[in-house]
Amino acid sequence: MNDVSMHSGFPWLTAVVFLPLVGALLLFFVKETAVRWVALGLTLAELALSLPLWIFFDPSTPRMQFAEQVAWITAPSINYSVGIDGISLPLILMTTFLMPLCVLVSWTAIQTRIKTFMAALLLMETAMIGVFVALDFVLFYVFWEAMLIPMYLLIGVWGGANRVYAAIKFFLYTLTGSVLLLVAILVLFFHGGQTFDILLLSGVEYPSALQSWIFLAFFAAFAVKVPMFPFHTWLPDAHVEAPTAGSVILASVLLKMGTYGFLRFTLPMLPDATDTFTPSMIGLSLIAVLYGAYMALAQTDLKKLIAYSSVSHMGFVTLGIFALNAQGIEGALMQMLNHGITTGALFLCVGILYERTHSRLIADNAGLTGPMPRYAAFLVIFSLSSLGLPGTNSFVGEFLVLAGTFMWSKPAAAVAALGIILAAAYLLWMVQRVAFGAPVAKTAPKLIDLNLREWATLTPLAVLVFWIGLFPNPVLTPMHASVNHLVEHLDQRHTAVARRGTLGTDGRWLTITADGEQPPASAKSHLPPSTIGQTP
Amino acid sequence: MIYALIPLLPFAAFLIIGLAGHWIKDRAHLVAVPAVAASFVLSVLAILEVAGGRTISVPLYTWLSSGDMRIAFGLSIDRLTAVMLLLVTTVSSLVHVYTIGYMQGERGYARFFAYIALFTFSMLMLVMADNFLQLFVFWEAVGLCSYLLIGHWYERKSACDAATKAFIVNRVGDFGFLLGLLLVLVSFGSLEYRHVFAQAADLTTDTINLLQPFGGQWHVSTLTLICLLLFVGAIGKSAQVPLHVWLPDAMEGPTPISALIHAATMVTAGVFMVARLAPLYNLSPTALDVVAVTGAVTMILGATIALTQTDIKRVVAYSTVSQLGYMVMACGLGAYTAGMYHLLTHGAFKALLFLGCGSVIIALHHEQDMRRMGGLKGRLPVTYWTFVIGSLALAGFPLTSGFFSKDDILVSAWSAGSLGKTLAVAGLLTALLTAFYSFRLVFVTFWGASHVDPHHAGHVHEPSKTMTVPLLILAVLAIATGYLGIPEFLAPVLAGPAGAEGHHEGGTAIMVLATSMGLGGIAAAYYCYVASPGLPDRLAQQWQKAYRLSLNKWYVDEAYDRTVIRPTLRLADRLWTSVDVAVIDGAVNGVARGIAWCGWLLRLIQSGQTQHYALGMALGAVIILSAYLLF
């Protein structure tokens, strides 16, 4: 993990990280009436600026790309050090993609302090992207904590009736985890050669006992963010009270911080502890999958239902990560993206509905297909995606996670697959009650179909749902090198290939080859040569 | 390559109607019908090409690759696929034409065409799949279309309930399918049929210990497990016991889709899957036995329920359940050709029966209760005669297609060991019931005195040509499919299990018995519903328990409601209120409250009076000193 290809020339990453921050400051010099357009322009510019990262990304190498390093503090050595690989790239693109949609959905929903609101969104964007690109632990921690403040404000200022309780609960929950993260970072600093460099620290072998302690500290920080059972109760409250844009950011990006932390820090730095705790992590993931689904089944509030479905879906992500094989981890990454797209879209749908009927209760919003056919179509599409229908994005992630898990443990995969039945139950039941039937008298006159702005908010997500579902390879390709590298890294420390399971056996591949067929294993010619040696 | 157009044309029609539906509106059929008709023509070309023994394969694209796993989509057409293509495109074309008349002036006309085009695409992709994943993807896609079409009249709660139920019940089946698929992937390292079939024989000795997580020992052959898990998917899709409950409710959808999806094509996907995967099933006698018995139970259960139903479509729906049972049973006995043969003839005559029901329902302004019909044969002659032909085929009347295919199943069953003999007897008895309920339907609906709502009775008339022509074509097919040499055509690609080949014994005896069962059933129906009309009510009085059991569909829905649905919802509710809110969030808020309380306690100390602080300091000094001295 020590390889970094330093980037000379235009500092793309710095530009991508700080453009929103500059924009947020700029916003205070803009007229109140123009704030929305300027914010939209800024987020679109940010999206445009992030596209070269994808276009010029070299998928053949696991090394950090677009890397930049500037000394920040000399003693102890703390650097402004950033870079991206196949694990962070998709998450950054997802973030820049969603932000314009967040601005669009807040267009009329936010009426008070619009300037501050948009500034908070932009600050949030800088902090989130900062977390994904940081290669120095102190820098990482600064961005990590910086996310809390705008989110706290988004919930606490523009939230619903019980916003203060939800905001404080969110803040304290996350902060508790973060404090332990800080302690763990300091311990790593002293044991890993007095450096905060994340890549250097990933190359150090720590004593097993120490690894376990650090694992638990990391776990506290990341499990709260994911959120894993039983640290999830801040999520429904935060979602219900947050404004729509806040919910979208929360669900689509903030939750990924936890799983990103597992992938970036826990797995590479603490392989022994990962090994020790894997059964517990798989167990917690399975509980989350089923428990979240059962909770969703019991909800009467649309936002709570989607919030609990997030617990279930994020259970799939942690399950894939701790399957510790290429399929599981790539599936987890896919599921992170897909959850961002689909759940984000579902929250947008609820927000659009709430603007009309001022109620999030399922009972108040019925029979939408008649008066709002386009809205209903989007709602059905995103619900089908959320329940993992093949042909939509979520199926790709869930399939890979289940395949990865199945190689690790068949019973675990079987239990997780039960979650897919439950997902169909709670989502279709929701669709039936909201989209079908006849409208409720109370809200019927307010049901007006999507306007152009709302249509523009949802369409890009619907396109992504099908594009990723039908052609997942372009999204998976940039991940391969980094994920394979991570898996190899785990293998080097542990000859645990047998535990994680593999596809087929030597003998069977030979039978195919004897027929003059290409063994499927060597078909992945686009992978770097080093990873091909991994085949059984 | 041109054969890729077979599925893609209906897909293009779906995209055009789906995206431009607002503009197309009631001209949707102008897009959909030619597309499906062209697919039909291409399917004919395809079957002519593969008749020579060739297999057409069209690679499409690599869907995903991850680690050492690579999954590609592709199309493959052999004889088995080709006959399915022909069935799907024929019935779909006819149903498309029929829909023009049936859905005329309905809201959602364009939407309906978009969905049946999408369904046709998905079903064609399903049968043309060359790997398990594609099979699964389109397996769920046809389920989605079924869901959308059952819920076509979305304002109606019963329709929405039925749609949701269909999807969720199928998901239960797909749960098994998905696990089976993963087991195939892990065991063979590939999901392509040809790789898997080529290596299947090497895997016969592999076992999996099912009780391993609990420390027990229960070794099951991997192949058996694969076959059984995949069959769970078939149980869902092909409405076999115990997952048959969704199919009768699916009749809430418009009748054309009952004919296309819930009779001729989608519900037969399970049978097709078992036949397609014959090389795997042949290696697992246990799995085959399970398949056979499941089919037989379904066959009997469906027929007994069909006896007493009064909704015209539900009678036909339960007969579909029962006939699917025949097909599954045949496959389970290794008689794949017989099963597939019945699938094809059934596709023709059951589509005919459903479309016939549709034409009655339209003529009576959406009346579906048989008790408010009667005496329609004079008013609806085309519907009546075609319906009779369909019923004769269903009853296995000599020289109709159903006679040949059912006979083929029964003869193969009789030659398939002791289990086969038992099931053949069950099949014969079911044939009697089948003939009885199908002619009960004919006599009650078309014969006797009219019980039609007097409001509509005056203007009951035959529907438009777009509806009667498909009926006439299907009536011809309901006879003709028996004479096309289908079993001989399929035999080379559908070998049964090793050792099961051989002479068919007792062929003539079975044929005579089956024929007399069919004729007996028809005669009994005539006696009960024409000759002495009071008899059925008296019998129902006399055998009240049996009558109620049949009328209430063996109480299966009620059992699910009590044992699965309500407990699940109750558990969800309990977990939420007692675990999530009370325990977990209670602990979280409790911690917060505890800290606040500590703060309050500490605040008491800060009284602001110097003597209190001095006292505190003195006490502290004493405690520290004594601790120091004592330890």
Image (spheres, coloured by chain):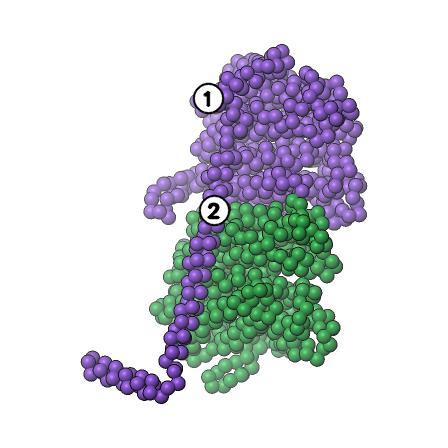
Give, as a three-letter code, the residue at label 2. Arg
Residue name at image x 61 percent, y 59 percent = A347
Give the chain ID for the green colour.
A
Label 2 crowd (10 A; few <14 / some 14-19 / many >=20): some
Q: Quadrant of residue B401?
A: top right
Q: Position of residue B503 (x, y in %)?
A: 51, 20
Of residues A531 and B210, the one drawn nearer to the viewer in this rendering: B210
Alpha carbon separation for disc pair 2 and 1? 43 Å
Q: Residue at x 52, y 40 (%)?
A: B173
Q: Secondary structure at mark 2?
A: helix
Q: Find numbered disc 1 in the image and state the secondary structure of the residue it sits on.
A: helix
Q: Tell me the residue at 65%/33% (across/down).
A: B258
Side of A327 relative to A122 (left or right): left
Q: Chain of mark 2?
A: B
The answer to which quarter of the image holds residue A182 is bottom left
Q: Is residue B509 above or below residue B291?
A: above
Residue B428 appears at what percent x and percent y?
52, 19
Q: Which residue is labeled 2 in the image?
A: B570
Can you tell which chain is drawn purple? B
The one nearer the camera, B149 or B212, is B149
The quarter in which the N terminus of chain B is drawn is: top right
The percent coordinates of residue B328 (x first, y second) are 53, 30
The residue indicated by pointer 1 is B422
Amino acid on which disc 1 is placed: Thr
Is B234 in front, or is B522? B522
Q: Is residue B9 above or below residue A354?
A: above
Q: Chain of mark 1?
A: B
Q: Residue at x 36, y 88 (%)?
A: B610
Left or right for B321, reference B93: left
